[in-house]
Amino acid sequence: MRLNGKTAIVTGGGSGFGAGIVRKFAAEGARVTVADINADAAQAVASETGGTPLTMDVTSLADWERLAAQGPWDILVNNAGTTHLPQPMEQVSEEEFDRVFAVNGKSIYLSARTVVAGMKARGMGAVLNVASTAGVSPRPNLNWYNASKGWVITATRAMAVELAPHGVRVNALNPVAGETPLLASFMGEDTPEMRAKFLSTIPMGRFSTPEDLGNAACYLCSDEASMVTGVGLEVDGGRCI
């Protein structure tokens, strides 16, 4: 019960890594709000874990303000993310580029204006941004997704150093591709051949799982990590070595 009594928000909590984090947090005693743009997915995970579902667009300031007003919050996990399909950088449309940076980057800015500002005022809190190994060791043809996750890593470090005097810790997770709804988008197509190609770049020979991310997130957001801030923890089976 490492998170007993704590209130937590997990964006993109209705599926994939987010759902794994929600399940782990709930098992460790947290009261979790499952925020997702997919209302049915948020409801399903919340019902399973005893949490509270919230339909939310992470690119909307109004939605973030509505969420902040439901606080105070002890833990915020900025997990919601998206990508463009693998293609040469010049072929990615402006619409796709804007969507990737709005969901992956702007959402963290909006969270800082609202939920994190409340943590700062209270003098306590833990923020976890889900970045990616793509921000550390980029893959070809995912250029703007890579760049967006590199932004998340730098934003995490910048937030950490500014918020440390106010009692708020900020860390990131860098998973490798995993069994999530985005996997097919990363690969371009989900075939045994493409899976084998991706897995060949991971020394441990498997994808990240929602359980892997839940376990790592639980540590970084718990009091056990009270001296840890500004870290980008790679949960990648050796991908970035």
Image (cartoon, helix red, strand yellow):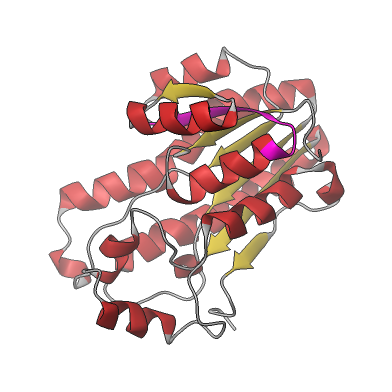
For the residue pair 191 and 60, the one nearer the viewer reads as 191
Q: Is residue 168 visible?
A: yes
Seen from the viewer's position, the closer of residues 128 and 194 is: 194
- Quadrant where the C terminus is found in the figure: bottom right
Q: Horizontally, is 47 left or right of 193 in the view?
A: right
x and y, in percent, of residue 149 in the image: 45, 58
Image coordinates of residue 126 in percent, x first then y, are 71, 38
Q: Residue at x 49, y 62 (%)?
A: 132
Quadrant in the picture for residue 173: bottom right
Quarter where residue 37 is shown: top left
Residue 6: x percent and y percent? 75, 28
Q: Residue at x 81, y 40 (%)?
A: 2
- Image quadrant in which the N terminus is located: top right
Residue in the picture at 51% in, 19% down? 67
Tell me if residue 94 comes above or below residue 183 in the rendering.
above
Q: Is residue 189 left or right of residue 221?
A: left
How many labels were placed on the picture? 0
Q: Position of residue 48 (x, y in %)?
A: 52, 32
The reply, left or right, for residue 123 in relation to residue 160 is: right
Q: Is residue 64 magenta?
A: no
Q: Is residue 225 above or below residue 108?
A: below
The span shown in magenta is 27-37
Q: Which residue is located at x 35 percent, y 83 percent?
A: 196
Residue 59 in view of the camera:
no
Instruction: Name, please, the residue furthest toward the front.
Output: 48
